[in-house]
């Protein structure tokens, strides 16, 4: 596979099925260092499957997946330490407090006491969770829960962060806060791949891959894609529907 040096995540003609369901039907994409790449598509499009493959939690039936030039499924590869993953749900221990969750994940990542103390404070600060350290994860609001999950995934300072629908079920204010937080991390050099079913979030990404029924139907700068379809960049839903219609001949849109 041709992985140029600035490609952090690559998929080449990846296929993955579950029984009779073909979740991914030959997907190729590349996420470059320091970019925000949005995997945008409706429920069931194959976003979670793609992310699980990138994290090495699933193996492809065909095709190849590379994370920082390595096979992410190789448990002995050091690349796994450079990877952060925030799955869609149930990422935290609900009956543990904010602080206990952070502590648990720090132990999992083998952080020294010194590193943990420093990063705990920094992450509580940027997620604005400092006042809630004793609150059980289950008792947090949707937005706070997502921020805590993010904080736990950032403890080991990953180079690449994979986020599966981080703003699902989050109110608009918290959504904006989460995105600001993410931009800050990218500004510091992290690469971000984020999946979302919300078309308006496409405009927040440097590049997007539009996933529909297991196929990448378009990829590129969201502003450029909107321009090509005569839509305002803010009306990405129109772009997506036009692309789906083109692909399905109007049968599914
Ligand atoms: N473990 C599994 N067993 C059986 N089918 C699965 C499994 N995981 C995914 N699928 C199926 O593969 C397809 C793609 O699912 P996937 O979860 O990747 O989509 P998605 O875009 O993340 O959607 P959602 O946002 O609803 O999770 C769906 O038809 C789903 O039912």
Image: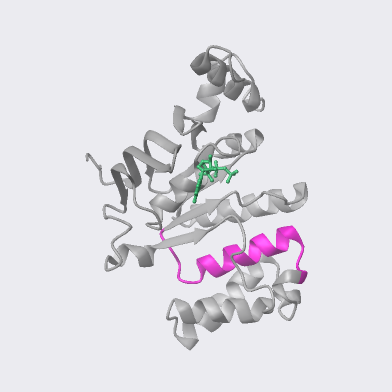
Residue that appears at 73% across and 70% down: 138
9 magenta-colored: no
Q: What residue do we see at 61% from left, 77% from top?
A: 101
The number of discs equals 0
Furthest-left residue in this view: 1
> In the rendered structure, does residue 145 fall within the stretch colored magenta?
yes
Image coloring type: one colour
> Which one is nearer the viewer's eye here, 206 or 75?
75
The structure residue drawn at horizontal position 44% and vertical position 53%, both measured from the top left corner, is 52
Residue 2's x, y, as percent? 22, 39
Q: Is residue 156 left or right of residue 250?
A: left
**Residue farthest to the front?**
20
Describe residue 96's horizontal placement relative to residue 23 as left or right.
right
Q: Position of residue 218 (x, y in %)?
A: 46, 26
Magenta region, main secondary structure: helix
Q: Is residue 163 above or below residue 196?
A: below
In the rendered image, which quarter contains the N terminus? top left
Can you say whether 104 is above or below 63 in the image? below
Question: Residue drawn at (38%, 63%), measured in percent from left and top?
Answer: 82
Image position of 191 with respect to 147: above or below: above
In the image, 161: left or right of 121? Answer: left
Q: Quadrant of residue 137?
A: bottom right
| Magenta span | 139-159
- Residue 113 x/y as whole percent: 49, 87
The foreground one among 133 and 185 is 133
Q: Residue 178 at what x, y percent from top left?
A: 65, 54
Q: Quadrant of the C terminus?
A: top right
């Amino acid at each position: 596979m041709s992985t140029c040096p600035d490609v952090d995540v690559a998929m080449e003609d990846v296929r993955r099925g579950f029984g009779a369901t073909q979740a991914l039907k030959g997907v190729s994409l590349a996420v470059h260092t320091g970019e925000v790449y949005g995997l945008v598509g409706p429920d069931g499009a194959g976003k979670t499957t793609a992310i699980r493959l990138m994290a090495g939690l699933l193996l492809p039936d065909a095709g190849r997946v590379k994370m920082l030039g390595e096979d992410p499924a190789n448990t002995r590869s050091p690349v796994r330490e450079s990877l952060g993953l925030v799955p869609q749900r149930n990422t935290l221990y609900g009956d543990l407090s904010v602080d206990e969750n952070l502590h648990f994940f720090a132990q999992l990542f083998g952080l020294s006491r010194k590193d943990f103390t420093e990063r705990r404070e920094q992450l509580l600060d940027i997620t604005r969770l400092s006042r809630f350290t004793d609150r059980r994860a289950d008792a947090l609001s949707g937005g706070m829960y997502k921020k805590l999950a993010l904080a736990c995934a950032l403890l080991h300072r990953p180079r690449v962060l994979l986020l599966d629908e981080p703003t699902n079920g989050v109110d608009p204010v918290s959504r904006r806060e989460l995105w600001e937080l993410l931009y800050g991390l990218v500004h510091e050099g992290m690469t971000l791949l984020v999946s979302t079913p919300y078309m308006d979030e496409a405009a927040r990404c440097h590049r997007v891959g539009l996933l529909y029924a297991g196929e990448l139907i378009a990829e590129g700068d969201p502003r450029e894609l909107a321009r090509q379809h005569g839509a305002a960049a803010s009306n990405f839903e129109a772009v997506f529907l036009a692309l789906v219609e083109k692909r399905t001949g109007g049968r599914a849109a």
